[in-house]
Amino acid sequence: MMVLSWLGEVLYPSKCILCGRVLGKQETDLCGICRVNAPFYPYSRVKPAPKGILNLRFLDSFTSVWYYEGDVRRSIHRFKFCRAAHLSAGYGRMVAMRLAESFPEGLDYLTWVPVSTLRRMSRGYDQSELLARAVGRELCFPPVRLLKKIRNTRPQFRQETPEARRANVAGAFAPFESIDLTDKRVVLLDDIYTTGATASECGRILRQMGAGEVHIVTIAAARRR
Ligand SMILES: [Zn+2]
């Protein structure tokens, strides 16, 4: 077993999930340089502020591990578009740490923003579900599928205005199955938070299902200008 693990390290050395450098013996997930220089998101929980016509009243708080820029941006791009599903384990550990420090009072449900069936088939996986399952493993708190995407949407980053972003995701999600979330605290996981249009639309459905609180936690957040 030791020989196999040694061989595995030689053939497939562990790499930094952000920059791809080969990790030293004492390093996990992040290399020493990224551990210091990565653009960590500095707030544990903030109330999402509306911008333009976006209505974020369905979301109680937001937090993230990093800002979406530089190596973080390139890493998430590989995760979503280049079949780098293995990155979910490292992201899961980082998000789990952020979640544990942000929610000392605990939570009732851990769930994720799902992709459509079509997107899942073309990509081979739902990256946010992989993230949620990795976070669940770290926290010994299994995620629950609460939402489904009922129509394919265009990529949010191609939508130029808040109006277009909101219209793109309006009515795109529905309850996965009938479940009563009355007064429950739900944490919703996603890969990137930009304007909050997608998270807010998911929050709206979770509120309709009775959720008392909906919090969004992501791997990375766009810097607000
Ligand atoms: Zn690195």
Image: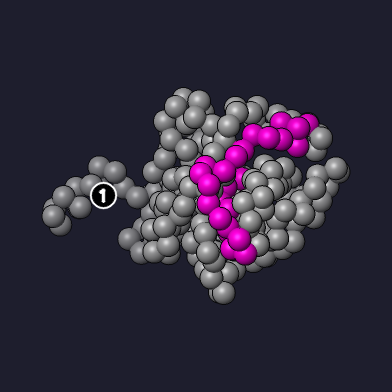
**Quarter of the picture holding the N terminus:** bottom left
Residue 46 picture location, percent across and down: 72, 63
Q: Nearer the viewer, residue 220 or 10?
A: 220
Residue 8 picture location, percent across and down: 23, 47
Q: Nearer the viewer, residue 151 or 1?
A: 151
Which segment is the magenta one?
A: 164-193
User: Residue 44, can we see it?
Assistant: yes
94 vs 67, left or right, is left
Which colour scheme appears in the figure? one colour
Residue pictured at 56% horizontal, 55% vertical: 180
Amino acid carrying label 1: it is Glu
192 part of magenta stretch: yes
37 part of magenta stretch: no
Question: Which element type, helix, strand or loop, lies under badge 1?
Answer: helix
User: Residue 193, can we see it?
Assistant: no
Residue pictured at 75% horizontal, 37% vertical: 166
Q: How many marks?
A: 1
Residue 171 picture location, percent across and down: 68, 35
Q: Residues within 10 Å of mark 1 (few under 14, many from 20)?
A: few
User: Which residue in the rendered view is the most extreme toward the bottom?
Assistant: 105
Residue 23 picture location, percent across and down: 38, 54
Q: Is residue 144 above or below residue 121?
A: below
Q: Is residue 52 above or below residue 120?
A: below
Residue for badge 1? 9
Residue pictured at 42% horizontal, 40% vertical: 85
23 vs 67, left or right, is left
Q: Is residue 24 above or below residue 199?
A: below
